[in-house]
Image (cartoon, rainbow, N blue to C red):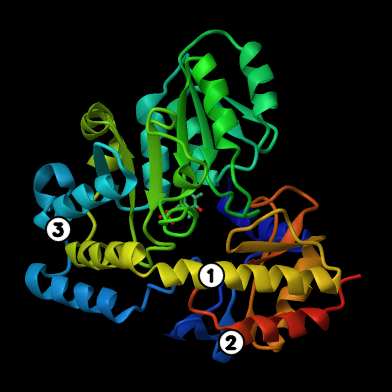
Amino acid sequence: MKLDSLSSQLDGIKAQGLYRRRRVVEKIHGANAFSDGRPVVNFCSNDYLGLADHPKVMAAFLHGAEIYGVGSGASHLVTGHGPAHHALEEELAEFTRRERALLFSTGYMANVGVIAALAGQGDWIFEDRLNHASLLDGAMLSGAKLKRYAHADAEALRVLMERSPPKERMVITDGVFSMDGDLAPLPELAVVARQAHACLMVDDAHGLGVVGPTGRGVIEHLGLSATDVPVLVGTLGKAFGTFGAFVAGSHDLIEYLIQRCRPYTYTTALPPAVVEATRASLRLVVEETWRREKLRSLVVRFRSGVGQLGLSLMASHTPIQPILLGGNELALQASQSLLESGFLVAAIRPPTVPEGTARLRVTLSAAHEEQDVDRLLEALARLDVD
Ligand SMILES: *Cc1c(COP(=O)(O)O)cnc(C)c1O
């Protein structure tokens, strides 16, 4: 692309209603923030349990910086792998009930890295149509052949696999779908994958900490084993309230990734203070079960309220509660008018979601109070979306 064509490209993006503009969001406390200087209640953060500013998480971060300084100074394979990283990996392995876990700097890198390490040219990868972009990018980087199956449809996957050559195969899915909030049909996918001798990988970025009786994610909620899902990716910037990601699985999987995963090898390890903060938040995820309970009751309250307004909700029982509007401009206008009422709710447009399915992506958090939800419902009732 020529640099002198950028301005006409930008005009084209604007004409489609797809222009993206960043707001400056300044967090105050919990879900309260300033958006470009305007006080708002944030209804689009992924801090589902409200742990990002928990006093114990903040204290662990400060203490970590006092002991270790700020930067880790190098990649894990050089000198960046410290005692905090090592301890968190052991704690995450225990939390996910797997042999080992490996820390990554971001979920994007974990997904791209794991897929490109496990699949290559000549292999086949099958992904849900609505998988997170990082899972698609990983497949592209791997050089494997990528096939996408109809959303959450294990039968469609089975048919697609039957028609493909008996090569090395991976089946990859979000656990909780990030823009729809529904769950992958993991028991069915696991059966199809097993019959086809394929490896099933689940990215549970939005499930861990939130879904399942003890917050161990969709795998716990749906009663699957580590044999059913040998490769599990989790992120730490959402329900854990900090930053980073990890892959959990067998001893051999983790050792292989240490040898062969380029986004693991060629990047600086997470700052140890961030890791200490995550160790504190992991303890809170396990201990403060009231956060999940509060979140569940807010989800029920929100869904019954929106149902009464006649707006179009999706089949989600997670804290991701999108309201489907369709048009890009409509979604933008709705988001803007909610902002004027003091609520920050992101309009999600293509290519993040399929064409014609622009939506308001409302997310709930244990940091919200019932009256926050009730006031949001009142503002939604005032929206003009017909
Ligand atoms: C947010 C997200 C990621 C990326 O995680 P980061 O740590 O933010 O890079 C990966 N997968 C899914 C499903 C996500 O929602």
Determine the residue located farthest toward the right in the rendered image.
Answer: 386
Element at label 2:
strand
Residue plotted at (58% across, 87% down): 40
Task: Check disc 1 and give the amino acid type.
Answer: Leu
Whether the residues at callouts 3 and 2 have beta carbons within 8 Å, the answer is no
Q: Is residue 220 left or right of residue 182?
A: left
Residue plotted at (38% across, 72% down): 51
Give the distance between the C-alpha atoms of the residues marked 1 and 3, in whole angstroms: 30 Å
Q: Which mark is residue 84?
A: 3
Kindly report which numbered mark, 1 or 3, lies closer to the viewer in this rendering.
1
Kindly report which numbered mark, 3 or 2, lies closer to the viewer in this rendering.
3
On-image quarter of the N terminus: top right
Q: Is residue 145 above or below residue 141?
A: above
User: Where is residue 277 drawn, in percent x and y?
Assistant: 25, 68
Residue plotted at (68% across, 38% down): 151
Determine the residue located farthest toward the top in the rendered image.
Answer: 166
Of residues 99 and 89, the one drawn nearer to the viewer in this rendering? 99
Task: Check disc 2 and give the amino acid type.
Answer: Val
User: Where is residue 97 drawn, in percent x and y?
Assistant: 30, 42
Of residues 285 and 233, the one drawn nearer to the viewer in this rendering? 285
| Residue at the disc numbered 2 | 40
Q: Is residue 181 left or right of residue 335?
A: left
